[in-house]
Image (cartoon, rainbow, N blue to C red):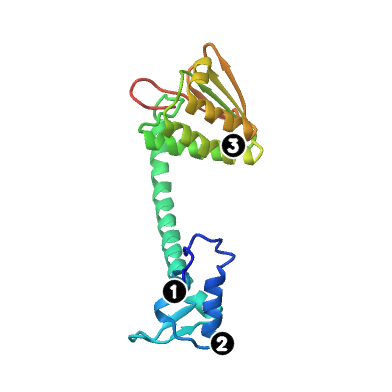
Amino acid sequence: MRDRPNCGEADPKAPCDWARDLYRRAIVERDNFSDDIPDCLRKLQLLITSGQEDGQAYAVPPAVAAEAALRPVEEEMARLRREAARIRATMAAYDTVYSEARSQGEETVTVIYGERAIHHALQAAVESCTEELLVSQPGGGLPARLLHRGLVLSLPLLARGVRQRTLYQHSARTHKPTLAHIERLLTDGAEVRTLAETPDQLIVCDRDAAFLPAGEDGGTR
């Protein structure tokens, strides 16, 4: 058996010559190479075998293979859409409860607890930004996980042409990971400045929604 390329590493839109050649041979010559079928052709259902030992490999027309390969994917997508619709309907019912309960109190801000909940709320707000994102980040260097989260939120925003302006303290310049993070933001079009002292941590989306720490309890508002 000749050397084979690493299946899956090539551009899926441009199959490797080896796989294309085997598929062509199966169509034209009906060559028996069932033990040497590339994984990509198996997964795409383009080559199938008789199921018997040393069985012949048979070429399947792409249109037919697509039906076989895509059906489980489409069924799973349909299941996920149904599940998403069920969750939205349930949340709508709880949204009514939440709004009614809030109307009985005197709070004018929403307090969100828990790191995951805060991250998802912030992600939704940032993704909805259409004009401007303002960020104030006090302190020095940031942990790697927060820097990564920041890029995941900021880069798509900047790609859409939303203006981002960020303030850091001067001490962030001496923290290499944070400095590299800042340089990446600058490369993608963000505006970044450092000050001797910055205001409290703050994130403002379109000057419509603001996120700031609520206190030592770990919440945000």
N-terminal of the two: label 3 or label 2? 2
Residue 155 screen position, x and y as percent: 57, 38
The image's mark for residue 129 is 3
Quadrant (top left, top right, bottom left, bottom right) of the C terminus: top left
**Where is mark 1, residue-wise?**
42
Residue 186 screen position, x and y as percent: 62, 30
Q: Measuring 56% from the left and 74% from the top, which residue is drawn there?
A: 20
Q: Measuring 41% from the left and 81% from the top, which residue is drawn there?
A: 34
Q: Nearest the camera: 178 or 196?
A: 178
Q: Nearest the camera: 62 or 31?
A: 31
- Please, what is the three-letter code of the amino acid marked with disc 1? Arg
Residue 164 screen position, x and y as percent: 61, 30
Quadrant in the picture for residue 109: top left
**Where is mark 2, residue-wise?**
28
Q: Measuring 59% from the left and 27% from the top, which residue is drawn there?
A: 207
N-terminal of the two: label 2 or label 1? 2
Compared with residue 144, is residue 72 higher up or lower down, i.e. above or below? below
Q: Distance between the Cα atoms at labels 2 and 1?
A: 18 Å
Query: Disc 2 on helix, strand or loop?
Result: helix
Looking at the image, can residue 165 be seen?
yes
